[in-house]
Amino acid sequence: MLHAQVVPSLMKWGVSPHADLVYRTLIAFGPWSVDSISRSLEMRARQVRSALDELTALGAAVPDRALAEIGRDERVWSSRAPAHVVSLLRDRHHRHAQARHRLERRQSRMASPDLVTDPLRIVASGARPVSSGPQVRARIAELNEAGRHEVLSMNPESAYSATAVKAAAPIGRKIAASGITTLNLGVPASEDDESGWHGEEMRCYGMQYRELPELPGRLVIVDRTTALVRKKRFEPAHGMWEVTAPELVAELTALFLQDWALATDPGRDWTPPASLSPRESTVVALLAWGFTDAAIASKLDISVRTIAYTLSSLMDRYDVTNRFQLGLRLGAEAAQQASGETATRHGPEGQQNR
């Protein structure tokens, strides 16, 4: 049972946690009524109806039939196949991405300037050049290992290749293992981006992430004492400047924090329950994305057996016998957690707490 097929999470495509949970339930048990779903998931009937409305609008669920019993909501709902639903959601995502691209092109006249607006000032400060990709990665790793408090990172690219992500992942894991505060600024990912899984992994380990439509350049600041600044905004081959002059580092830090305050958290496809460890959260989140055990093992540099042990331990903890049941339990807990977080942000009259 440890190798049962996992239904990809619809939350990757912007579907709400409640709707994703209801969809998985329909996949598992076939056509069901609102009352049956509500009892099984211990969700309020109005929450189930709202989730079904969302799934129906997406083409993921359809009303199957209506029974003649009076006084009860006995309309029966069924799900469409995951492959069909994911195809619909992917097409919707592609249309939204095209619209966003057209908007970004219209806004390009207001593009932000490069971080390095005065290269002579950088040189005069005593900054040293770090010239190539491997040297940059090695120097970032050295600085991170020496860091004690904080890493601020700004990344203007909308897509990273699988090779680049694989090369950078060990550095990110070392930062995560050290418990250093990490703030990461990025831009919305394009369709060919291969870094999403690693971003999810880092967020499971506590990295804070926000986005802006555009960023002025590549920047890494360690402990607010050393900064690495890309020489050319979208040209990594030109290398970076390593800046240690306190005045310049303070200016770059202020610029980063200014953009951070303007940026927003785009949200996650699915936030694992807080009771899970970072490793457990990462494995479960990547399974929800639809990755196989072998793919996850390759990406996280762990063995397939480690993944099996991790999931087996979770099944014992949640008293379930297979992955699908585990997914339902975790989905219900995550949905309850999300509802609780929403409630703490809003007062009894629906006003947001400040």
Image (cartoon, grey):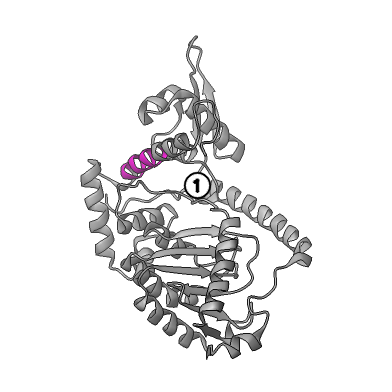
Characterize the magenta stretch by its predominant secondary structure.
helix
| Residue 337 drawn above or below residue 170 | above
The residue located at (48%, 68%) in the rendering is 152
**Residue 18 on image: x %, y %:** 46, 37
Residue matched to label 1: 10
| Residue 167 drawn above or below residue 1 | below
| Residue 310 drawn above or below residue 170 | above
- The stretch of residues the image draws in magenta is 325-335
**Residue 324 on image: x %, y %:** 34, 44
Q: How many marks?
A: 1
Asked if residue 65 lies left or right of residue 171, the reply is: right
| Residue 25 drawn above or below residue 210 | above
Q: Is residue 328 magenta?
A: yes
Q: Answer whether residue 240 is visible to the viewer in this image.
A: yes
The residue located at (64%, 50%) in the rendering is 92
Q: Is residue 191 magenta?
A: no
Rendering quarter of residue 319: top left
Asked if residue 126 lies left or right of residue 275, the reply is: right
Q: Quick one: label 1, few (<14), some, or many (20+) residues within 10 Å?
A: many
**Residue 188 on image: x %, y %:** 60, 60
Q: In the image shown, does 162 or 293 lie closer to the viewer?
A: 162
